Image (spheres, rainbow, N blue to C red):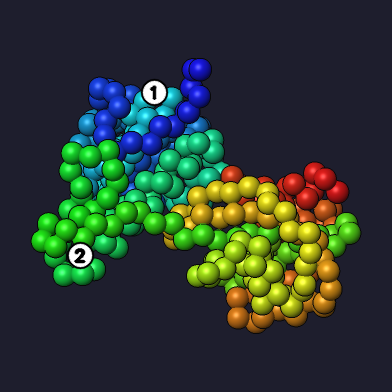
Amino acid sequence: MKNYLRFQSSAILLSPERDEDLYFIFNNGKIAVNKSKKIIKIPTRKDISEMGLNIKNPMYIGSFDNINCFGGTCENIPSGFKNLEAIGLRELSYLVEKELYLIAAKVFLLINWEKDHRYCGRCGSLMERKKNKNERALICPKCGFTTWPRTSPAIIVAVTKEDKLLLAHNKNFENGRYSVIAGFVEMGETFEQCVKREVFEETRIEIKNIKYFGNQPWPFPNSMMIGFTAEYLSGEIKEDGNEIVTAGWFRKEEICGKYNKSNSIGSQLIENFINTH
């Protein structure tokens, strides 16, 4: 079946290199894109060559629609040339299709993983990429310790109370912006236990009828967000005052303008509530 998998992840080259190969290049957490007349494109091998960019720690990511994808970092992203700009990953999520955003997120995660594991956790030697294997791993040339990319599981949940949705304003959010409840899974905890705990810790609300919604890689910093829906059981809202500043129940007509529309699963959960109530 043609394009059964639009993106094929691989650590070794799947097809010969061509001018149209895509390059996901980051500098200080921002990605280089061609931005012209509101059309966003990922730079190609040809673009990178014409700009003379020096790509550090290049890595092969896989193939997207039979086009090779590479990642790496660059000390400076020259703005203006061929409409090149550096934008944040969150902004990118609003501007490109979901598949391209997820590839960019994968590159970002791998770059940070290599950066955080430069030295062996056992003997302190410099780590190296594992060679001659279709395997994404770092190995210590001295003691042989090997490490693989890891993802931290986190939950995100839309809690409803009749025709209202529970939304909270985190202290790190922009003014006036809200989202659904989210948090990291603790060691030895099931997803459902985490959903109950996070909602209760942050709002003192008890919930029921927890149901799986979907999932999404989330590179802030290295999470896999597992989405759920749930229903109100009991309790009165009392913000934890640590992460959550304000929280409340909102009807769908009250939500517009209170959240950032994007490809994020948090946005999807909110829009699912709006579309079903």
Q: Can you give x and y, in whole percent of width and height, for residue 98 in the image?
A: 54, 38
Question: Residue 216, can we see it?
Answer: yes
Q: Can you give x and y, in whole percent of width and height, for residue 191 in the image?
A: 61, 61
Give the labeled residue for mark 2.
Answer: 119
Give the labeled residue for mark 1.
Answer: 66
Q: Can you give x and y, in whole percent of width and height, for residue 156 in the image?
A: 63, 59
**Type of amino acid at the residue the image marks with label 1:** Asn
Instruction: Classify residue 82 by image quadrant.
Output: top left
SS label for mark 1: loop
At 58% from the left edge and 49% from the top edge, which residue is drawn?
215
**How busy is the neighbourhood of tag 2: few (under 14 within 10 Å), some, or many (20 plus)?**
some
Toward the viewer: 152 or 189?
Answer: 189
At 17% from the left edge and 53% from the top edge, which residue is drawn?
128
- Residue 78 placement, left or right of 248: left
- Distance CA(mark 2)–CA(mark 1): 35 Å
For residue 202, above or below residue 213: below
